[in-house]
Image: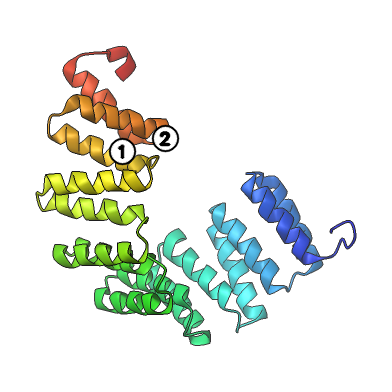
Amino acid sequence: ATQLEPRAIPPLLGLADVALKQGNTKQVESYLQQALAVAPQSVEVQAAWGRYLYLQKRFPEAESAFKKAIAFDPKAVAPHLDLGDLYLSGLRKPKEAIEAYRAALALDQSHAGAHYKLGQALASNGEFEAAKKELQEAHLLAPNDPLPLQTIGQLHAMRQEYEKALQAFTETLKVQPKFVQAYLARGDVYLVQGQTEKAVTEYQEALRVAPNFAPAHVKIGMLYESMKRTDEAEKAYLAAIENDAQQSIAYNNLAWSSAERRTRLDEAL
């Protein structure tokens, strides 16, 4: 497509997406710079450039790109959401994120994702009731999305409102029965309540749904370790590592188990 029309924007952005998935950041930047040279006032190009800068943790430059995109078209919803994401997750400025998400909702009140993100930002700012209201609105607008209900459950768990948390996680699983994070979260609540067997059941249920889900193996390993069932704990940690070599807790706990028993110390090291 670029050979047929070198100044066409969509194929340049498409090539940038492919390069990003390949992990070739230099190539991503090259394609985006070409697109910027062709259409410096394109909202889509500026937003794509901002998202790339955000991924590279070049936060001030990303902020500038998103603000340019908004200036080029104040009615474009996506750059407001991008700016909110930057403030919330990158710069850790929940108040600014709230403003950005509300600006997006002023343009489109029916945007479920904007309500969900606003709920997250409000929760980060300590505004629990307002956050819950936005998350409930997101659920009403996107009833098949498990994330709003899951997040409501997490908020209740943080406030030690465990029964309400369990109810929210159960509702999440009604929406999406294979949403493994809800099983883990429900297991965590049972664990805090001292209901160990129920916690094990929830973690095992997560593995029934997703046998290769390493965090569930880690959770089971930690539970067995607390119960002094060392061999079963080690088996769970090894399963976690087999499925995801980046599970640092599994490595650490395997090492500690060997150190405490003074066995396989070279392997533990």
Estimate the x, y position of residue 206 in percent, counting from the top left: 31, 48
| Above or below for 235 versus 89 | above
Residue 94 visible in the shown view: yes
Q: Earlier in the sequence, mark 1 or mark 2?
A: 1
| Residue bearing mark 2 | 243
**Dot 2 crowding, Cα within 10 Å, few <14, some 14–19, many 20+:** some
Asked which quadrant contains residue 79, the reply is bottom right
Asked which quadrant contains residue 246, the reply is top left
Estimate the x, y position of residue 178 in percent, counting from the top left: 37, 55
- Asked if the residue under mark 2 is in contact with the one under mark 1, i.e. CB atoms within 8 Å, the reply is yes
Q: Which mark is residue 79?
A: none
| Residue bearing mark 1 | 217
| Residue ranking furthest to the left | 194
Q: Residue at x 26, y 41 (%)?
A: 219
Q: Residue at x 39, y 76 (%)?
A: 138
Estimate the x, y position of residue 89 in percent, counting from the top left: 43, 60
**Dot 1 crowding, Cα within 10 Å, few <14, some 14–19, many 20+:** many
> Along the line of sight, which residue is nearer the eye, 35 or 132?
132
Report helix, strand or loop for mark 1. Answer: helix
**Does residue 125 appear to the left or right of 229 in the view shown?**
right
Q: Residue at x 61, y 83 (%)?
A: 74
